Image: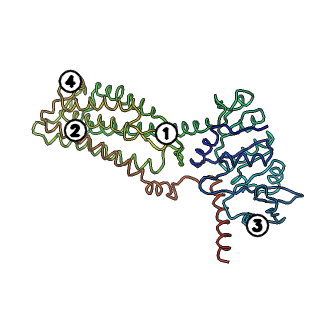
Amino acid sequence: MENHLKSDTTDCITSLVLSHTRVCMVTGDNILTAITVAKKCGIVPNLNIRHDVILVRESNGGITLQLDFNEDTAVTLDTDYSSKGIVEAIRDITANPYVFAVAEKDFNVIAENHPELYELILLNGKVFARMTPGKKQKLVEDLQKLEYTVAMCGDGANDCGALKSANVGVSLSEAEASIAAPFTSSTPSIACMIEILRQGRAALVTASVTFRYMAMYSMIQFISTLLHYSIGSNLTDNQFLYIDMFVISGMAATLGRSLPSKSLAPTTPKAQLIDLKVFLLLTLHVILTFAFQFSFLEYIRYQPFFTPYVPKHDLKEGSCFENTAVFLASMNQYILYGVVLSEGPPHRMAAFKNWSLMLVFLIFTVVSVLLVMQPFPWLNNLLNLVSLESNNVRITFLLMMALNFVLAMALELIFEAPRLTYYLENVRFLSRKRAKYVKLSSAWESVLEEFDSKNFYK
């Protein structure tokens, strides 16, 4: 009797490995069967650099490490071994990159009596065999203690505990496991994990994009209102209505409709909405926004047809050249930032593939051009705008709008540069706290590098 791998299993695991997602096998099968299957499906990495499997066994209170199924390579750890002793034993077996495989009876003893080795197995373990339901749940919980985000796939009652404890539990059947798991896949395939990661990452990016757009909307309107107050005026009711009900609603509703990328990227999006990079970028966008609104206002003041605004009690009757200039500048910014801030790859499709966003952007851009060129007096009257009276002024306004778009897009591209991103994300007092498993991995790698360097020069 033989139970073959599903046709899409290897491709799915390869995609997960290429996206730097750690993949482990936790099974009730015999450990030798589990190792064989793990090699076939790619759980044991073999894409660029071959990894050896180190089998960890417990015997009479001692710990033995051996290469795969080859008992001739077995090395027994001393009773008072240290981290250096573990590394020395591993290097006696293989000089290649390695992963661990362990069965449940050995797993229990190591977890209770050998904390250093258990820590290393949690970091580098790939195959956990003969695992009972309780031990599957314990493994998930111990990985979470190292601050891993754990996703678990299962299809039977023996997976219920682990599915419930995992950060993301996915049942591959509609039987008992589906009761404990938050997600149930309609098809019994691990391809669902790729879909969950794609959608989850895109959702995080969408949340960040929407937050930044609404922040910019608030600041744009704050600046335009501030400039109006400086002359004793304000936006009219019709202008507020057009901006809030049509422009902002249209852009905000379509920003989140970008689809996830077709493939998983090797990086993950940030889980927080605000950090140093976002703060600096928003600050520069706000400065740019103020610069252009103020430039529109000052430019109109130097025109021969300009008449200064005289404050009135009824602000709805306060239409003037200053109001027209600031309104046209701010309206253009509401529209352009809908595209500028619409982040695309690597986690979402490019903005131009979001047809609803592009349609809304095109419609409001056309309306903006019509409001600047003023071919229809009734449209300008509807929004309480005065005539600019000069085609040169109108064309200059359009060029300034285009320049605003180009500079805003350039800011986004500059801040996406890998080197700048690295420096901003690693500012000592503002950098994100490293997960516990990252710190432990670094510590073990240091021990391994130290051992290798000493033996290299011998």
Residue kind at label 4, given as amino acid type: Asn
What residue would you read off at disc 3?
85
Tag 2 near tag 4, CB within 8 Å = no
Residue 135 image position (x, y, % from top left):
79, 43
Q: Judge by depth and name the residue closer to the eye, 390 or 327.
A: 390
What's the CA distance linking mark 4 and mark 1? 44 Å
Q: From mark 2 to mark 1, how far is it between C-alphas?
A: 34 Å
Q: Position of residue 158 (x, y in %)?
A: 78, 35
Residue 107 locus on image (x, y percent): 80, 50
Tell me, yes or no, whether the two marked residues, 2 and 3, touch with CB atoms within 8 Å.
Answer: no
Residue identified by numbered label 1: 261
Marks 1, 3: nearer the viewer: 1
- The residue tagged 4 is 381
First along the sequence among labels 1 and 3? 3
* Residue that label 2 marks: 398
Q: CA distance from mark 3 to mark 4?
A: 83 Å
SS of the residue under disc 4? helix
Sequence-first tag of 2 and 1: 1
In the shown orientation, is residue 388 left or right of residue 288? left
* Residue type at tag 2: Leu
Question: Would residue 391 appear left or right of 146 to someone viewing this image?
Answer: left
Q: Amino acid at mark 3?
A: Gly
Instruction: Verify CB contact (< 8 Å) between mark 3 and mark 4.
Output: no
- Specify the quadrant of the image occupied by residue 300: top left
Q: Amino acid at mark 1?
A: Ser
**Viewer-closest of 96 and 182:** 96
Q: Residue furthest front?
A: 1
Mark nearer the viewer, 2 or 3: 3
Q: Position of residue 82 (x, y in %)?
A: 76, 65
In front: mark 4 or mark 1?
1
